[in-house]
Amino acid sequence: MEITYHDGAVVELSFDKKLHAYRVEGKPVHSATKVLSVISKPALIPWSLKMGSDWLEKHMFHDEELDQDPRGVFTYTSRMTLDALIKGIKAAYRGASGGALHTGTVAHNWIEDALEIFIEGEGEFGDDNLPELPDDNDAKNSIEAFELWVGENDIDFISSEEKVYSREDHYAGTLDCAAYVNGSLCIIDWKTSKAIYPEYHLQNAAYAKAWEDIHGKPVEQTLVLRLDKSTGRYEQGYQSTVEWNKNYEAFICALNLYNRLKELR
């Protein structure tokens, strides 16, 4: 695909979905998400431990003969070897992560299909031409949260799943949405995670700066919109122009670190 910038420049950008890899004029460039992989994600450690412990509890039983043992000894089921238990514990968080990823993908795809209708001016929320809801209940709740957000705000959608490239800092990415929200130009990122984590704001700032480079318009706010897959409610993480530009400076620090570590390997 070609990206035409506000100053008339044209750049050829390609994206390999399977490898999640971008190329500009045939040369590889970093993705914003890959750059941010250098940032530690401390919340993942207790979460993965919880997944492992939950799996272990599910696959073990408490020996009734040991109920009176003050040591509270637990035994593992005879149908499962200790090696199998260890492998199960290690794999538990990967299974949970895969399920969460599936839910997020299903919800994202529905929103993308719906926005195509709105951006092309063929309908509004509540019309019969909306995409069919998925079977995944968690995804349905996320979609319900999205519909609630749209209904409670004045939104003029500009683009969805737009690919961007920063000519100055040489990274690429795909933003979820650009829109006017209650009169302010926003770059929006949908999330179905349990919280709005700090690195989300850095990612969104990278998209905002690249979007400005392409369109020549100032982004007034960035928004991380968390669509709760359990409650069907939403949480908004707005960043003002001053704030998201600070986030962009932090993103550039991550980009420099990523590049330097790559050089040292």
Image (cartoon, rainbow, N blue to C red):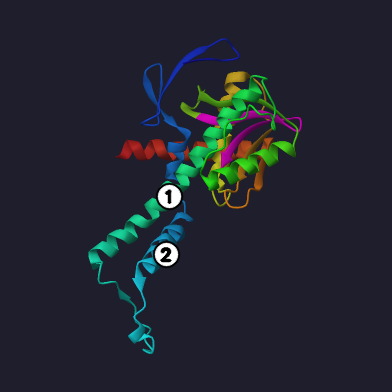
Q: CA distance from mark 1 to mark 2?
A: 14 Å
First-in-chain label (1 vs 2): 2
Which stretch is magenta? 174-191
Q: Position of residue 240 (x, y in %)?
A: 69, 38
Q: Give 197 or 263, whichever is nearer the viewer.
A: 197
Which amino acid, mark 2? Asp
Disc 2, SS = helix
Q: Which of the image's four quarters has the C terminus?
A: top left
Q: Residues within 10 Å of mark 1 (few under 14, many from 20)?
A: some
Q: Give 115 or 13, whichever is nearer the viewer.
A: 115
Which residue is disc 1 drawn over?
97
Residue found at x 51% / y 36%: 252
Q: Residues within 10 Å of mark 2 (few under 14, many from 20)?
A: some
Most prominent secondary structure in the magenta stretch? strand
Which amino acid, mark 1? Ser
Q: Position of residue 152 (x, y in %)?
A: 75, 39
Above or below residue 10? Residue 48 is below
Disc 1, SS = helix
Q: For residue 226, which quarter of the picture?
A: top right
Which residue is disc 2 drawn over?
54
